[in-house]
Image (spheres, rainbow, N blue to C red):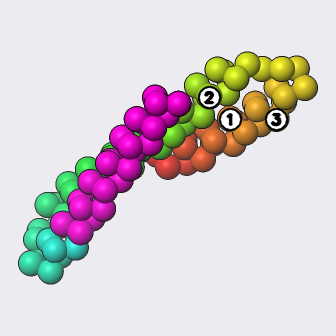
Amino acid sequence: MKKQQSTEQNLKSRLHKIVGQLQGIDKMLDKGASSEEILVQLNAARSALLSCGKIVLEGQIKDSLANGLEPEDAKAIVERLTTSVERFSSMM
C-alpha cells in the first residue's frame, strides 16, 4: 500500500510540474518567444505527459499481475490491459 501511495505522490508531483511547464509556455507566448523555443517547451511537456502515462500503465500491469490471474478473471484483465496499452500508444 505504501508503494502505491509513493507512486501516486510521484505522479501528482510530475503533473504539477507539467502544469508549471504549460503556464511557462503561456507566458512565453505573451512575451513573443520564438516558435523554436515554444516548440522545445511543448515537446518537453509532451515527453513529461508520456512519462506519466508510462507510470500509470506500469502500475496497472503490476497490480494485475500481483493479484494473480484467476482463469475466470483472466479475459477481463487482458481486455483492460489491452485497452490501456492502446490508449497509451495513441498518446505517442
Residue 86 lies, in percent from the top left, at 63, 42
The residue that disc 3 covers is 76
Q: Which residues are magenta?
A: 1-24
Give residue 75's position: percent from left, percent from top: 84, 30
In x, y percent, where is residue 62? 58, 25
Specify the label residue 63 is tagged with: 2
Element class at badge 1: helix
Three-letter residue code for mark 3: Ala
Amino acid type assigned to the residue bearing label 1 in the image:
Leu
Q: Which residue is mark 1?
A: 81
Indicate yes or no whether the magenta region holds residue 55. Answer: no
Which residue lies at the image location 10% right of the left edge and 77% below the top edge? 32
The chief SS type of the magenta part is: helix
Decide: few, some or many residues near mark 3? Use Cα within 10 Å; few <14, some 14-19, many ≥20.
Answer: few
Residue furthest toward the front?
2
User: Disc 2 vs disc 1: which is toward the camera?
Assistant: 2
